[in-house]
Amino acid sequence: MRVFVTGASGWIGSATVPELLAAGHEVVGLARSEESAAALEAAGASVVRGTLDDLDVLASAAADTDGVIHLAFKHDLAFSGDFAGAGRADRQAVETLGDALAGTGKPFVLASGLLGLRSDGVATEADGHEPVDSALYGEGPSARHATAEFTLQLADRDVRSSVVRLSPTVHGAGDTGFVAALVGLARAHGFAGYLGDGGTRWPAVHRDDAAALFRLALEQAVPGTTLHGAAEEGVRLGDVAAEIGRQLDLPVRAVAAEDATNHFLWLGPMVGMDTRASSEATRREVGWRPTGPELLEDLAAGAYTDGPEA
């Protein structure tokens, strides 16, 4: 297949592109900078220049390829506090891509998230499909949920749509996401902190395993399928803090709930979301078999702490 990938030079995209190429697919990656374009070309992909705001570019690229993997999201905008703006941009991009693919039967794979999906048990692929008012899609963190449900409904328009819900930590050497932020906070505060009793749990998946799941979704997922990128059901954040403390030779301390925002900053609301997720149905439906190291193994190997700013 000739596959259009947004976010192709990002953290997950830079693993997904070689995964697709190794499987014999041709990749056309969206690049918003010369640096990103050069990286994609060096990896063996073709390049389309543009951003998520260039809707005509997205539509043309989707129409000219055999399928789409949509990984891009304005994380910088969301983490600056404008989640509504990031949500609106993502929804407009997805609507544009969906319109371009409607009636073709081509695959469309969307990256979404697991964090906060369910707090009273283990979330499965069948959870989180409650109706969402599309008029509210840009109003907060529910934006991504609403957009994911919209994507699944594209199956009714003859699009082989699927959604990959990713763990909050897609880990590995070079990650600059949530775990890297926790390491940075530990360095800044002089101790590795965890919220309350440290019992909050997050699912986790290695970046290479996430890339493999996107390829499998592209190749095999039936229309309207939800898949879970969770190699580990739930890793205690207290254990994560303990390993960060060992790696940095720093004390490990509890952070009270009332101090969460002061200590964890933008991560404050997220470190309190106890989320466990199963991927049993995903493994059964598309044959996904995660093989990468687990999160604590990556931490113990120094993936986040080797070097002065790692």
Image (cartoon, helix red, strand yellow):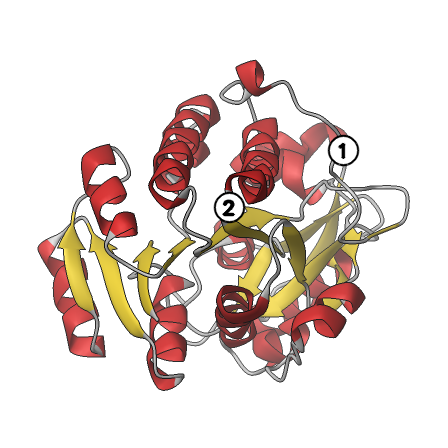
Kindly identify the residue that appears in the image at 44 percent across and 64 percent down.
175
Q: Name the spot of residue 33 as percent of width and height, x first.
A: 14, 51
In what element is the residue under mark 2?
Answer: loop
Q: Nearer the viewer, residue 66 or 113?
A: 66
- Quadrant of the rendered image containing residue 301: bottom right
Spatial CA span between label 1 and label 2 = 47 Å
Please tell me which of labels 1 and 2 falls first in the chain. 2
Measuring 17% from the left and 67% from the top, which residue is drawn there? 46
In the rendered image, the vertical position of residue 73 relative to residue 47, given as above or below:
above
Q: Quadrant of residue 1?
A: bottom left
* Residue type, label 1: Ala
Position above or below: 88 against 268: above
Residue 307 visible in rendering: no
Amino acid type, residue under disc 2 in the picture: Asp
Instruction: Report the residue marked by disc 2.
Output: 158
Q: Residue at x 17, y 44 (%)?
A: 50
Q: Which residue is mark 1?
A: 257
Image marks 1 and 2: residues in contact by CB distance under 8 Å: no
How many residues crowd around disc 1 within 10 Å: few (fewer than 14), some, or many (20 or more)?
A: some
Looking at the picture, how far across and down is residue 107, in whole percent?
Answer: 46, 57
